[in-house]
Image (cartoon, grey):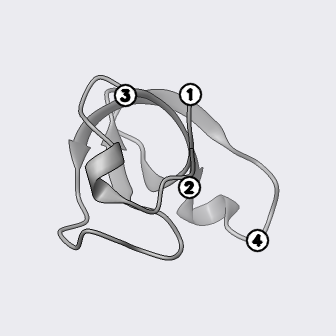
Amino acid sequence: MNGQNRDDIEPGMEVMIVLKEDQGTDKLTKGIVEDILTNSRFHPRGIKVRLEDGQIGRVQEIL
């Protein structure tokens, strides 16, 4: 599943995100969702989340 729909993502899920500094590259970061930061139900580049380790990025894949 891609990470464009807010309803598909919940705290505690394992996801792959792209960090701001990694946009435009193929580098993804794996982590557990702590908070969902995007308020809208859909975002074409991925829903923005905060991981448990504090990193913030857009969800590219739900594991």
Q: Give the SS element for disc 1.
A: loop
Give the vertical position of 55 relative to 26 (above or below).
above
Image side of residue 49 versus residue 2, left or right:
left
Dot 2, how many residues are within 10 Å of its Cα: few (below 14), some (14-19), or many (20+)? Answer: some
Q: Which residue is mark 2?
A: 19
Residue position for label 1: 63
At label 1, the amino acid type is Leu
Where residue 41 appears, as percent x and y from the top left, is: 25, 68
Occupied quadrant, residue 48: bottom left
Q: Which residue is mark 3?
A: 53
Q: Nearer the viewer, residue 60 or 50?
A: 60
Quick one: label 1 or label 2, which is nearer the N terminus? 2
Residue 25 lies in quadrant: bottom right
User: For numbered disc 2, what is the local secondary structure?
Assistant: strand
Query: Which of marks 2 and 4 precedes in the sequence?
Result: 2
x 46%, y 55%: residue: 57
- What residue type is disc 2 on? Leu
Q: Which tag, 2 or 3, sits closer to the chain's start?
A: 2
| Mark 1 vs mark 4: in front | 1
Q: Amino acid at mark 4?
A: Gly
View extreme (right): residue: 26
Sequence-wise, the earlier of marks 1 and 3 is 3
Which of 44 and 48 lies nearest the eye of the viewer? 44
Q: Position of residue 30 (x, y in %)?
A: 58, 30
Q: Disc 3 versus disc 4: distance between alpha carbons?
A: 23 Å
